[in-house]
Image (cartoon, rainbow, N blue to C red):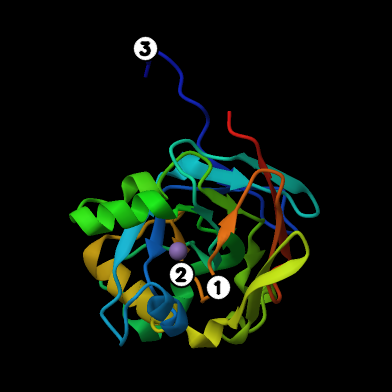
Amino acid sequence: MSLVFQLAPQPSVPVLGQAEKFPVRRIYCVGRNYEEHAKEMGFTGREPPFFFLKPADALVVVNEGATGEMAYPSLTQNLHHEIELVVAIGTGGRNIKAADAEKHIYGFAVGLDMTRRDLQNEMKKQGRPWCIGKAFDESAPMGPITLKAQAGDVNHADLEVAVNGAIRQSSNVSKLIWNVAETIEHLSSAWELQPGDLIFTGTPEGVAAVVPGDVLVGKVAGLGTLTVKVNPAK
Ligand code: MN
């Protein structure tokens, strides 16, 4: 097939211990999926999970041991970090039951759902879509994928992010309101999942602002470290 122009290559993420990279199709994200974070956002209780998306080319892929870089985005004065466990889907499906979800998982990674909080809050207030707050360029730094079999018990893994060496968020994946399997069940009832899909599973409490020059170090136990530097705005 001939095209009128060539697009940038499909975004892809390295897989630890493998030469082949994981090509990325879609990035699904879960909102307010830790109780203490829901509270700090002004909500309480267990509500059904809800989802938003980021474009695949919003990824900032950071290799093992490297420091990724993102520019401070435009239009905001309140860029927040959200440390998250990322699930990589290897086998697609629709209406997947939680009990069957595990076989659809390829691996796991550490991700940051970077958020223009001031713009997101304004959109919430006006009942408008979150896109401008969530789905901007370079809004999804993530580290390499660890294969499921090598990832250990991610459902009970500690996760944290430090900014310039000070811990900002520290929790455990077991505190997810909707765990990974339940999230896959809900998500696959709304969209048919495909190989290459990523799921950012939500963030615990402690979200806060970063500024140019800050260095974020995110961890999910068993999945390595994600280091990202925030550069001045372009
Ligand atoms: Mn998030």
Write down the residue under mark 2.
201
Marked residue nearer the N-terminal end (2 or 3): 3
In this picture, residue 134 sits left or right of residue 208:
left
Where does the C terminus fall, quadrant-wise? Answer: top right
User: Is label 3 in a helix, a strand or a loop?
Assistant: loop
Q: For the point 55% across and 73% down, which residue is it?
A: 206
Amino acid on which the number 2 mark rests in the picture? Thr
x, y percent for residue 63: 73, 49
Image: 33 above or below 66: below
* Residue lying farthest to the front in this orientation: 77
* Residue lying farthest to the top in this orientation: 4
In this picture, residue 75 sits left or right of residue 17:
left
Q: For the point 50% across and 57% down, which residue is it?
A: 113
Amino acid on which the number 3 mark rests in the picture? Val
User: Is label 1 in a helix, a strand or a loop?
Assistant: loop
| Whether the residue under disc 3 has CB within 8 Å of ligand 1 | no
Observer-nearest residue: 165 or 190? Answer: 165
Marked residue nearer the N-terminal end (3 or 1): 3
Q: Are marks 2 and 3 in contact (CB under 8 Å)?
A: no
Write down the residue under mark 1.
206
Mark 2 or 3, closer to the camera: 2
Write down the residue under mark 3.
4
User: Is label 2 in a helix, a strand or a loop?
Assistant: loop
x, y percent for residue 200: 47, 63
Q: CA distance from mark 2 to mark 3?
A: 37 Å
| Whether the residue under disc 1 has CB within 8 Å of ligand 1 | no
x, y percent for residue 100: 39, 81
Q: CA distance from mark 1 to mark 2?
A: 16 Å
Q: CA distance from mark 3 to mark 1?
A: 47 Å
| Whether the residue under disc 2 has CB within 8 Å of ligand 1 | no
Marked residue nearer the N-terminal end (1 or 2): 2
